[in-house]
Image (cartoon, grey):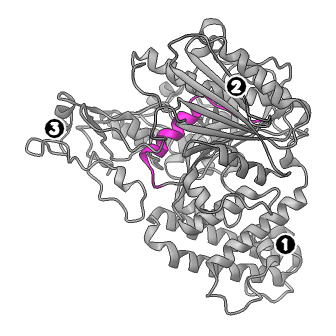
Amino acid sequence: VGPPPRAEIKYYSLAQHLPKMYEGEHYNKKALHGGICLYNRKRCSGEWAYPFDLSGGVYCHHDLLALLKQMTSEDKSHPNLLEIRANKLLKVLGDNASLNEHIDISQKSMCAIPTHPVLLILAVNRVQDIFQAPLALPQAGNKGDAFAKSTIGFNDCNKGNFIPTDPASLLNLLEKEYHLDGERYKANIYNSSHIGDFFIKHSSSKKEMNLCASTPTDPKVSVLIPVHRGPPNAASHSVMSIIMQPIDEFHRLREKDEHQQSTNLSPMQVVLVDDRCDDGSIDAIVKSCEALIKSYEDVSFTLKDHRCEGALSYHDTNSDSYHISISLDIVHSPKPGVACALNQGLRYCHANLVARMDADDICTPYRLLTQVKFMHTNPSFAAVGSSTILFSAMQNASKNQDKQGSNLNLPYGHLVQNEASFCVLRPSLSISDPGFMAWSMFFTCSISHPSIVFQKSIIQDLGGYDESFSRCEDYELWLRLLYRNSRSMVCIPFVGLWHRKHNQSSSSVGSSIQKDEADKASYQAMERMLYSSIEDPCILAIDNVSTLRTPSSAQSPKSLDLAAKLLQKLERSFFEKNSQYLTQREIALIQLDCNERIGELATIIITKFGTGGKTQLA
């Protein structure tokens, strides 16, 4: 609860602080998260404003000594008391400079979190008598919680000797043929550090449902990339970050001596759609892939260029016994436009799980593995996205941006020759509550299209991308999907994509067209939701939708007033349609969001138009 404002979260690279992880023989074993996200805890509430935790936190030694010096013996007599007292002291020290002899207030208001989950702690606490945190109780699950079916019910355990609330009983299970199911924790999404779930797995447990193709020769995942322009070096970097996904997975299994185990990503198919590309990006991609594959003995690579008559084919392998199979299909888009290119590419995708990617973005290590495993464990979802880092070449960044340049390590940057210096523009953290995401989508596209993995069968059943949209084809598709099922989309809270912004980026051109299309898609979605509940047709108008999405663009007090009425009716209809599927947390988030939007509309009426206009808001 209570995260900081998204615009205030900053990304910082760790490369300059941990040089040994990024040099020489240690390069490929570097930490998965290349950096951290910083935020001001004073701008937060709940666990976001709880900086001192005995489990999993990293602190400066002198800060801990300073805190302990100001504690009594009673404060230090119990771990829970120690936590409570430390957090109270940090708040007092941060608010009162006269008490701050050892801690630098200007720095200690900041907290950091990694860009990937890096730690799982099972706390079997026999002294837990202060906090009301759950131990490991089976969950009945909220009726609207898509993850309820994933929560263990201890059905596989020996009920005669097992007591879920007894720590000794839990530990006794781990001494038998059970072990912690780490993959199951990773495949669920949590909004709290105290979750009360105890996932265990018997050695004979069946694997989760697999949404991949049924035959061994078909791809387990297809990656769909429309290519209009790269530029060539960016396009090569993009596709190589994809090619490395199954290679990294296999090498990870081999390091664990589990290389005989079936992989989640191989065979993998990459589908490039030639959308009138004339800058050499596709040729650069092919050459880079061929060069990369030659450096790995256990990879088979197949190229099929369907643009040529008879589909030109090419196959290369460095070994008779390969473990990783990658195919690259190049197809031609029948007419201009990204929506048409995506629909054409979908026809050539042979896997049911399709990962989206743009030709200038970069995947982080294990992005696809994380998302594919999530989809296998949670097959009720149609699509899953991730958080992203927006970055740019230094010369393209605004002068007002908080830049980081020469020390910025891009994922898989060692595979490409690139002399440019890059800077982070901002992190874009995802919404991890499916119900709240469905609500937020009315006002903005809150999921990054190239970070998505979706089920092809569900998207095709919807009719695919609407080709009348030239720039917001993804936003329009997600709104149709969410109307059918408000819990069909979700984002995993990890950074899976580096999203490039540059002068040739299509998203930086034609912003007026993009805004008009976004307003149109939002209007259509609201019309579907309110089809029979609007008595006054003046309320559901495209101008009011535009004002609701961008209040600062309002042309009159009346338009703000109508936008507020539209919002209230939209909230009521959304709850009527989806209340049985929403969690209590999601309901609270939606209500809070509505209150904040109403407050923003009222504020703009007063600040932009004065108090003269008679409206319900003023």
Left or right for 217, reference 465: left
State how far apart marks 3 and 2 are (Cα).
48 Å
Residue type, mark 3 in image: Ser
Residue drawn where x is 80% and y is 63% of the image: 468
Instruction: Count neighbours of disc 2 (C-alpha within 10 A) and say few if under 14, some if 14 to 19, many if 20 or more.
Output: many
Q: Nearer the viewer, mark 3 or mark 1?
A: 3
Asked if marks 3 and 2 touch (Cβ < 8 Å), the reply is: no
Instruction: Count neighbours of disc 1 (C-alpha within 10 A) and say few if under 14, some if 14 to 19, many if 20 or more.
Output: few
State which tag comes first along the sequence, 3 or 2: 3
Left or right for 231, reference 67: right
SS type, badge 3? helix
Residue under label 1: 607
Specify the quadrant of the image occupied by residue 246. Answer: top right
State which tag comes first along the sequence, 1 or 2: 2
Please state the extent of the stretch shown in magenta in the rendering. 360-380
On whether residue 369 falls in the magenta region, the answer is: yes
Residue drawn where x is 65% and y is 64% of the image: 479
Instruction: Count neighbours of disc 3 (C-alpha within 10 A) and say few if under 14, some if 14 to 19, many if 20 or more.
Output: few
SS type, badge 1? helix
On whether residue 54 falls in the magenta region, the answer is: no
Q: Looking at this view, name the residue that lies furthest to the bottom.
A: 535
Residue under label 3: 169
Residue type, mark 1 in image: Thr
Residue under label 2: 240
Q: Quadrant of the C terminus?
A: bottom right
State which tag comes first along the sequence, 3 or 1: 3
Residue type, mark 2 in image: Met
Percent of width and height locating residue 83: 41, 39
SS type, badge 2? helix
Q: Nearer the viewer, mark 1 or mark 2?
A: 2
Say how many tags the image has: 3
